[in-house]
Image (cartoon, helix red, strand yellow):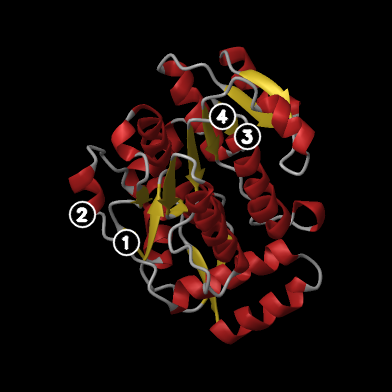
Amino acid sequence: MLVTGGTGTLGTLVTRRLLDTGHRVRIMTRNQMKADDLKKRGASIVKGDLRDVESLEFALRGVSTVISATHSMLGKGDAAVEIVDDEGVRSLIDESKKAGVEHFIFVSVLQAALDHPIDFWQAKARVERYLRDSGLSHTIVRPAGFMEMHAYVLIGKLVESGKRVVMFGSGNNPRNFVAAGDVAKMIVAATDDPRMRGEVVEIGGPENLTANQVAEIFARISGKKARMTHLPIAVGKVAAVAASKLHPGVSRVIRSAVLAETTDQTFDVSELVARYPIKLTRLEDWAARKKQSPA
């Protein structure tokens, strides 16, 4: 099977789990050096680019399953969302169909919608629709924000290092975070279970936590005091506009941070756990494991 975005956090975890369960995995990446560890584990590496049809044709030869874990939320220029997440993935779908791919697994995002206020979510929704219309057998996985980024990098890592956490709003609006490892388990399950074909699987973590609660969890585990600065939402909106002229990706992240404090970002896992036998990871457990094994 082919994994795109295989050197990212999710793609790496998916590839490791697939290899551990005996699957043959091919990674398509623009930077082969980033895939050295996966190569040592047994993955085959091909250099490719979603924007290069010839490289897609080569990467897809003999492939029965495609896992599209690519995303470029922070991208700009030739790595912008509209080029990678939209045009690029649609091209991958087209070439997969030509190559006779039997199953296409697309990693979207929770709350993907054509009328979403942020273009990243719009692009994911457009690709979902394109995939459904393509006629390919498929599974769509919509994860909440990853703990690794939205809880740890943006909050927890700063707490651990004694740095100040700056956020927009009060930090009291609950939101959902999911462990990338749990999403990887669901994707690997989809590769083996024909009952998941045609399904849209929404996956989040078992808790809805505020940003302040996230900071408290990392403070408790690290033994460091959480130092917080809360800026008005209006400041975030202005910052997003200003950043858009310099870096659309940074502007996108600021806008999503504002959205996280002003709209419903919770997720109810009851339907998920009723349909699929998965044990979801609590943030405190994830953070404790992170402390024990920082690598």
Task: Compute the Cα span from label 3 to label 4.
Answer: 6 Å
Element type at marker 3?
A: helix
Q: Which image quadrant: the C terminus?
A: top right
How many C-alpha atoms fall within 10 Å of the one at disc 3: few (<14), some, or many (≥20)?
Answer: few
Front residue of 220/11: it is 11
Q: What residue is disc 1 on? A: 267
Image position, residue 30 (x, y; %):
75, 34
Do the numbered discs 4 and 1 sit on residues whose CB atoms are within 8 Å? no
In percent of the image, x 81 and y 53: which residue is there?
78
Q: Earlier in the sequence, mark 4 or mark 2?
A: 4
Q: Amino acid at mark 1?
A: Phe
Extreme residue toward the bottom, this view: 234
Q: Is residue 288 above or below residue 247?
A: above
The numbered mark at residue 98 is 3
Task: Compute the Cα span from label 1 to label 3.
Answer: 37 Å
Q: What residue is disc 2 on? A: 270
Task: Compute the Cα span from label 3 to label 2.
Answer: 38 Å
In percent of the image, x 42 and y 55: which residue is there?
144
Q: What residue is disc 4 on? A: 100
Query: In which quarter of the view is residue 233 placed?
Result: bottom right
Q: Judge left or right: residue 190 versus residue 154.
A: left
Q: Earlier in the sequence, mark 4 or mark 1?
A: 4
Task: Compute the Cα span from label 4 to label 2.
Answer: 36 Å
Front residue of 33/135: it is 135
Q: Amino acid at mark 2?
A: Ser
Image position, residue 39 (x, y; %):
63, 17
Element type at marker 2?
A: helix
Q: Amino acid at mark 3?
A: Lys
How many C-alpha atoms fall within 10 Å of the one at disc 1: few (<14), some, or many (≥20)?
Answer: some
